[in-house]
């Protein structure tokens, strides 16, 4: 039996030398050291030995087991290391590959302009409001003194969703909405930036969707001179300290009197050029004193309260400020265009 044990040891150690995979090693372990393995098989016949022989053979059996276990552990470790090396070899990174270029984003020029306008009016104590782009016919037209059959509606053909619901053609419906919401207000100063829609064929200067900023001031004794003074200050902060403005009579159904505000041409300074069509001035917004009907429709007494309103096109101002000649460039989101604005501070 002693010989059998030693033979087993020699055989097991010879075999483990040839094992070169972890799965094979497990088969080896089960075969020699497992419960039903060779070593256990030999030990199961211990009963046939004499009482004197048993401890001696037991000792040898333990030595063999210890020997095989050590061999097992050593082999296991070296196989694990080999497996890891193999994995590492497959996973190496080629640091000489060229990297991917990552683009740095830039604020969209239209947002830049809106943010500037907001900053200026926040400085005047205005609030910034937002309204729905899908609007009721009532707010978009009727509440602005544009009844259903009014010819001035032709100026603003839009996308209808139903007879009574449409895409707003301007931000002016927020005048009526805020008058209603804040009733009975005695002091409103707000601007409303937002997208508006017109049924227009897109070209270099027209878009079926564009941005406006509406302004509304309501209070006791608000006069046209307040409108002009405030818009002059706005123009100076927006376009330069030495700006001059002029009001030209115009017509809007929701203001009376109505006007358009021109600034002195920012390119030629007033001497006349292609951009200002030799007039020396450029129109930037429509404005006027709120029509008494607009106040009355929301329950206000137009003899008590007055106010003014204005509305400007953001694209138009952005095109002037940044010398963009085609409005469609704002909507193509060409990174090369946007990048040109990344470093501009205004
Ligand atoms: N809503 C007008 C438009 O889209 C612009 C406008 C003109 C707004 C006069 C006003 C205003 O608030 O008083 O053409």
Image (cartoon, rainbow, N blue to C red):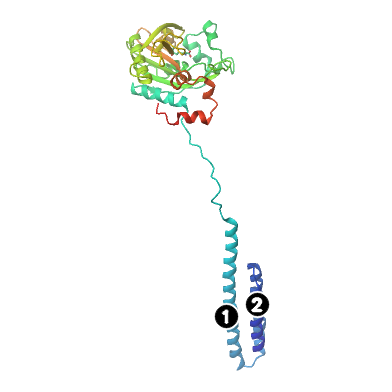
Q: Which residue is mark 1?
A: 66
Residue, x 60% and y 82% (percent of image)?
64
Residue displayed at 43% across by 26% down: 112
15 lies above or below 249: below
Q: Position of residue 300 (x, y in %)?
A: 39, 11
Measured from the top left, where is residue 106 in percent x and y? 47, 32
Q: Quadrant of residue 256?
A: top left
Q: What secondary structure is found at the residue carrying circle 1?
A: helix
Q: Is residue 223 above or below residue 19?
A: above
Which is nearer the eye, 1 or 80?
80
Q: Residues within 10 Å of mark 2 (few under 14, many from 20)?
A: many
Q: Quadrant of the C terminus?
A: top left
Query: Where residue 82 sits in the image (x, y, percent)?
Result: 59, 66
Earlier-in-chain disc, 1 versus 2: 2
Q: Quadrant of ligand 1?
A: top left
Question: As displayed, is residue 47 above or below residue 93?
Answer: below
């Amino acid at each position: 039996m002693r010989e059998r044990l030693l033979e087993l040891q020699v055989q097991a150690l010879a075999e483990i030398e040839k094992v070169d995979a972890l799965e094979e090693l497990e088969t080896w372990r089960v075969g020699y050291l497992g419960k039903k393995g060779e070593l256990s098989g030999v030990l199961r016949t211990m009963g046939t030995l004499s009482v004197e022989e048993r401890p001696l053979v037991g000792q040898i059996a333990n030595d063999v087991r210890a020997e095989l276990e050590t061999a097992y552990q050593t082999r296991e470790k070296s196989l694990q290391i080999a497996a890891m090396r193999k994995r590492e070899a497959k996973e190496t990174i080629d640091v000489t590959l060229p990297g991917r270029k990552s683009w740095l984003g830039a604020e969209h020029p239209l947002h830049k302009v809106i943010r500037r306008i907001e900053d200026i009016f926040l400085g005047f104590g205005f609030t910034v409001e937002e309204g729905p782009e899908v609007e009721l016919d009532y707010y978009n037209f009727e509440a602005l003194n544009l009844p259903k059959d009014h010819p001035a509606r032709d100026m603003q053909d839009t996308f209808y969703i139903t007879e009574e619901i449409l895409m707003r053609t301007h931000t002016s419906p927020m005048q009526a909405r805020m008058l209603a919401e804040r009733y009975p207000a005695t002091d409103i100063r707000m601007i409303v930036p937002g997208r508006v829609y017109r049924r227009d064929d897109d070209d270099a200067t027209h878009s079926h969707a564009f941005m406006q900023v509406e302004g509304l001031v309501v209070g006791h004794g608000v006069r046209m001179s307040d409108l002009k003074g405030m818009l002059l200050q706005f123009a100076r902060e927006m376009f330069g300290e030495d700006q001059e403005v002029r009001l030209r009579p115009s017509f809007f159904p929701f203001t009376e009197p109505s006007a358009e505000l021109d600034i002195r041409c920012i390119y030629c300074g007033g001497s006349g050029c292609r951009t200002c069509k030799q007039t020396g001035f450029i129109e930037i917004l429509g404005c006027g004193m709120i029509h008494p009907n607009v106040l009355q429709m929301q329950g206000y007494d137009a003899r008590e309260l007055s106010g003014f309103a204005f509305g400007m096109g953001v694209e138009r101002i952005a095109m002037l400020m940044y010398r963009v000649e085609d409005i469609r460039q704002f909507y193509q989101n060409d990174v090369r265009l946007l990048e040109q604005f990344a470093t501009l501070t205004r």
